[in-house]
Each structure stands twice: as C-alpha cells, then as structure tokens.
Amino acid sequence: MISKKNKLALFNPLSQENPVLVQILGICSTLAVTASLEPAVVMGLSVIVVLALSNVIISLMRNTIPSTIRIIVQLVVVAALVIIVQQFLVAFSYDVSKKLSVFIGLIITNCILMGRLEAFALNNRPWPAFLDGIGNGLGYTIILVIVAFFRELLGSGTLFGFQVIPQWCYDHGYENNGLMILPPMALITCACIIWVHRARNPQLQEK
Amino acid sequence: MTMNKNSNTYQIVYSAILVVLVGTVLALIYMSLKPMQDENIANDKRMQILSALHIAGGDNVKETYEKYIVLDMLVDDKGNVADTTAGVAFNVDMKANSKCDAQSRKLPVLKCKLDDGSTKYVIPVYGAGLWGPIWGFVAVDADGSTVYGANFSHEGETPGLGARIAEEPFQDAFKEKQLFKEGAFKNVEVVKKGQKPSNDGDYVDALTGATITSRGVSDMLAAGLAPYEPFLKKLQEN
C-alpha cells in the first residue's frame, strides 16, 4: 500500500515540493484567508478534501477522458466537489461558511487543484493520486496555518479567537499591529517563510 | 473494446453523461441538506434580531429568541396591527417585500420584552449596498422614537470598508437617535463627516472609504422606516 513511490507522493509536497513555497501556487487564497487561524484551518481542510477526492475521481476516469475536453471534465468534477463542500459547510458550520463564503467558491480556481490534476491524477492510479492529493493539501494547509498563526498573534493578540497576549502587556503600552491583518503582510510573512525554507534547503535555491 | 476517444460522438456523449450525473448528485445533496441549511439561516436571522436588541444569542439561539420576542405583528398603513399570527413578521421575505408597491407591501414588526420589563419594537429594513443587498433590524423604544439598537448585515460589501456596517462601532452609533423631531418623522441619516443631514434630524457619521455603502444604509433606513410613521406615531400617543 505504502511503497516508496507512494511515500514520495504523500510527503514530498510537505516540504521539498511544497505547492505554496516551491511551486508558488495557491497564493491568492493564502493571502485572503489567513487573517485568523480558524478560517485558515477550515480552508485547508476543505482544500484537502476537494483535492484528494478530485484526484481520485479524475484518476479513475483517466482512461476514458477524451484529451481534447479534459480541462472541462476536470473543471466539472472540481466545481461539483466544491459545491458539495460549500453545501455541507452551510448545513453544519454556518458561521465558518459565512466567513469563507467567497473563498470556498474560489477553490475552483485554486491553481494547486488544476495543477495536481493535470500533472499527477491524469497519469497515475487512484491510490497514489489520493495520497498526492492529501500530501499537497497538507502542504498547503501547513503554510496557511503558519501564516495565520503569525498574523493572528501579532495582529489581534489572539489564537483561534482566544486572547493569548496578556492584558498587562497592553497596560504597559503594547499595541496590536493592525498592518498584520491586511493582505500585504500575508505576502511578506509568506515570503519570510520561503526565505527560511530556501535557506535550509540549498538545493532549492535558484542560481 | 476500441473506441476513438477523440471522435465527436464520443466527446458529446461523454460530456452529456457527465453533466447529467453531476447534476443529479448535486440535486440530491442539496435536497437532503436543505432542512438543516434553512434552520441555520433562520437562526442567523434570529441572531441579527437579538443583536439589534443587544442580547447575546448564546448556544441556543432559537430558545433565546423565543424568550424575548413575544409577538409577531403586521401593521397596516394607518398604523393598526393587522395580523399577529405566530411567525408572520419573522417569515416575511424582505427581498421580495421591498420590491412591492406601497399598497401590497407588508409592514412586519417584532414586539420584544426585555429582562427589565421594557418593550421594544424591531423593524426589519432591506436595501442595496455597493456590491449587493444589505439589510438590517432597527429596534425602537416603546416611545416610538428613540432607537434602542440596530444591526446591519450585507452579502458582499468590501471587507474593511463597506463591510464595517456589520461591525459594532458603526451600529452602536445609532443608539439613542431620535426618529421624530417635534412630532415630525425624520429618519436617521448617514452623512459624511462635516456635512449636515438634509432633513435636520439625527444623523450618524458615514464610514470612511465606504461612501456608497453608507449612502445605501441611509437610503435603506429612509425607505424602510417611513411607511412605519403612522405606527410609530400611535406608539407615541399611548
């Protein structure tokens, strides 16, 4: 079940081939939903679910899909899955669905999805495709959570909505950094993570 | 079996089957989740109404709502209470209602009894922001003039700009504003800082960078509250 190749499919996207850090895919949603941890985690989970399922479905269909309309077929599958996720969120987690409203719909346009479908699911069997989906979804989620951690901590002084910076800090003149809440700081945080990541993985550095 | 996957027939049949299949699955899921979604949407509306009354919804929004909202009313254009069937005001579809002409328009009011024994009347309003619909609930004191609280929501106003109408600082500004000045109805206007309202009534500062959404709130209140003038006048006489 877990051959060496499958392990690569699952774990490589976490660091060496991280979709956000190395392939620079899915940046738009990384900027948009990382102002606090909760939507970031839900967004990450939603992408994992959609990515894994669409990878499996496309992989199962891969021998029947006419190559001329494969992009359309991929889009139909992804769009259907995204709508299903959205409906489930409205039914079971209404607050989150309100917060994420637009972004869930935008999973359809998340570059990671089409990228993995084209590059992996179309040429691989369902099980490796499933692992690849989980791996890439996790890789994306990890970055989302790291960015959201710093933005929420420095921007609002909270984590998952709970106050973590004690009141006496504020009493002594500490202030939340309002800039962290705004999208530009997500880009800068993300760039800092890429910097650290490249510094630790010299083979990724472009000459 | 060999089939030319790139023949026109294959492609058309393939896409047709795919679309029908996906459509069926989506329809089934939508149907089975609909009751829960409706419940969530109704609870969200209850939450907004309670928020206009400065009441926290808590874990069981429905229970809290039913505790404080004592009567659903439809009033007529003379200010008389026309209908008090349970849920009659809550279930008014404000979107369709706001498009009706003055005659056929329903005027829903929710009567509430707070912990301190005072009575408030919540009036729903509906209007247009910059990108989509905005709506809200205005709670009025039993004197028929003082605004007790307001809650505004929107579908897709710009985050950080127009979306701030749904935040507390803006909504709190409506507290204690008067809908009547010397017996004449003056809806609360939302005006830019430094400007004066056109009707000499009470006003609230507009949001910086959200001119059109602010104007939308102002117009929504003007159009939404004016038909209630007879009803509010009756409250003042009592």
Image (tube, coloured by chain):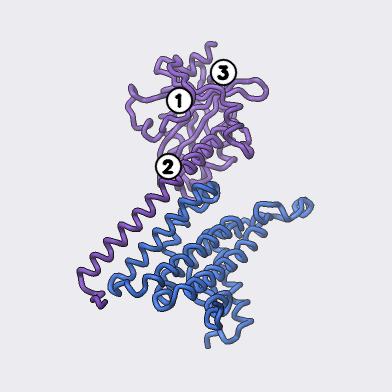
Chain colours: A blue, B purple
Tell me the residue that label 2 is attached to: B129
Q: Position of residue A37 (x, y in %)?
A: 61, 58
Callout 1: chain: B
In the foreground, B41 or B221: B41
Pointer 1 with pointer 3, Cβ within 8 A: no
Q: Quadrant of the C terminus of chain B?
A: top right
Please determine if labels 1 and 2 lie on a single subunit.
yes
Compared to residue B7, the image places residue A173 above or below, namely above
**In front of the other: A158 or A15:** A15
Question: Callout 2: few (<14), some (14-19), or many (20+) C-alpha neighbours within 10 Å?
Answer: many
Query: Dot 3 lies on which element?
Result: loop
Asked whether the residues under the numbered discs 3 and 2 touch, taking CB atoms below 8 Å apart as contact, a structural biologist would say: no
Mark 1 and mark 3: Cα distance apart in space? 24 Å
- Amino acid residing under circle 2: Gly
Q: In this view, does A83 lie to the left or right of B15?
A: right
| Residue type, label 3 | Asp
- Counting residues from the start of the chain, the first of labels 3 and 2 encountered is 2
Is disc 1 in contact with disc 2, using a CB cutoff of under 8 Å? no
State which quarter of the image contains the N terminus of chain B: bottom left
Where residue A95 sits in the image (x, y, percent)? 55, 47
* Side of A179 relative to A173 (left or right): left
Q: Which mark, residue A166?
A: none
Q: In which quarter of the view is residue B220 placed? A: top left
Say which residue label 1 marks: B88
